[in-house]
Image (cartoon, rainbow, N blue to C red):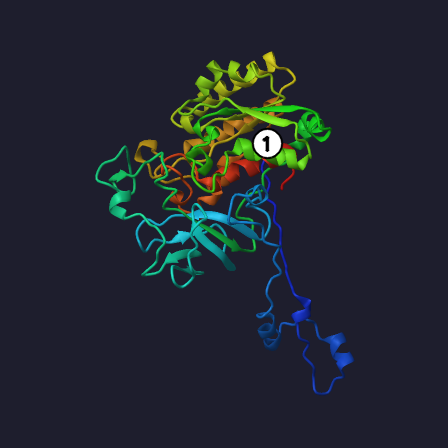
Amino acid sequence: MKSLFKKILIPILCVNLTSCTMIYSENQSNEDSLESQSIFDSSKDSESQSESVKPEYSQLLPYDHFDLNTYMKPIWLGDTIYNETVVFVGENDFGKLLYPAEEIISVTSYDLKTSYQKEVDYVYDPETNSILRTKNSSMPFFYEAGFYPQTGTYNSYSKNRGLLFSEGPTFSNKHVAVTYRTTKDDRITSPIDHSTKYTDILSKMQNGENVKICFFGDSITVGGNGSGFLGIEPNMPGFDTLVTESLKQVYNNPNISFVNRAKGGETSLWGYNNIHLVTDENPDLAILCWGMNDLGMSWLKFKQQLEWQIDEIKKACPNTAILLVSSMLPNGDVKEFNIRNDYENCNMILLEQAQLELAEKYGLGIATVTTMHKEILRYKNYYSMTGNNVNHPTDFIIRVYAQNILYALTGKTL
């Protein structure tokens, strides 16, 4: 099967030419020196001069409250990461960041209301690319004994103890949000632009026509455990709203709307048995987001149940476009999931593969969230990105969903 992935390398070279100093020889005129001496000279003196040259970064977007343009800035593009979530398990834990930080702009509480001070509350360790709490830090953290209790609803594979689980704001209250400058590399695969498969619906958006989108999936699609879902600051909405509002902005069309027919705790089989919830809406676009609750089944069974949904939509609503969305990964340390912290080879990877095959068979686009989350997990702890410590995202990963969906559908970003 032809691969639907590609790597995009975006080398960035930022040089402030006004701050570069030419070096002159005693026996040369200024004019001769300018002709012969390169500003990129590899001499020792030139190296010492270039060390003082700082990159020219893009203008900062608002990051002290929810802002659509800020939160929809793709994590694989640009030079700034906004409000990346980090949590500390134990006072001396490493709050690992996704990209190497060149400048820490802010570290705040999850609700963005409390600012933490460098050297007072935290330090940045470039060797581990981590935020570290200071001895007298006021930043929140989990005590290990509480995070890994003797018994729990779920159990930890690595600790052979219980594992803290909560659907409320327990985890959000302990997260901090980090905004920082970076030079991005190829550690995150850019999503594929599938816009050529959606020319009809994108034309309707472009022409200002009414367009209705129906989101269908499990509790992640419902919105769990985003701040808006929990009713806490910064009250970021779910990816259904993020995508819809972004489309309105991209196409300058206020007539784009959505309905959300997802239901928490359900599988793709429930989705098939209740596909009328989608077809009754007769939407212009159906976005199908399944996988998390299908983790325990074979990928062939999952593929069959998702294909049934596609067939029913095409039969009842032949003009409805369909976009598939693969799931974020569950916590690999949950013993009951039998992943054993091996995100590269867990069953969710196979479920995404099933979606890729269906996408190719039916000519559909797919937002490969599984792949991007897997890549992120090579650099960050799972508990720094989860709202319940088991299988729900923080605002940061909900944004990853929205950014992937928008780009897969339109090939555009905010």
Residue 297 placed where, x, y %?
40, 24
Kindly identify the amino acid type of the residue bearing the numbered disc 1: Thr
Give the crowd class for mark 1: few <14, some 14-19, many >=20 residues within 10 Å.
some
* Residue that sits furthest to the right in the current view: 31
Which residue lies under the disc numbered 1? 244
Q: Mark 1 falls on what kind of element?
A: helix
Q: Residue at x 42, y 42 (%)?
A: 385
Along the line of sight, which residue is nearer the eye, 166 or 48? Answer: 166
Q: Residue at x 47, y 44 (%)?
A: 376
Residue 77 placed where, x, y %?
59, 47
Residue 271 placed where, x, y %?
47, 19
Image-based side of 159 in relation to 248, left or right: left
Q: Is residue 356 visible?
A: no
The answer to whether 291 is drawn above or below residue 45 in the figure is: above
* Residue that sits furthest to the bottom in the current view: 27
Quadrant location of the C terminus in the rendered image: top right
Residue 332 placed where, x, y %?
37, 38
Image-based side of 343 in relation to 5, left or right: left
Q: Residue at x 57, y 26 (%)?
A: 258
* Residue that sits furthest to the top in the current view: 316
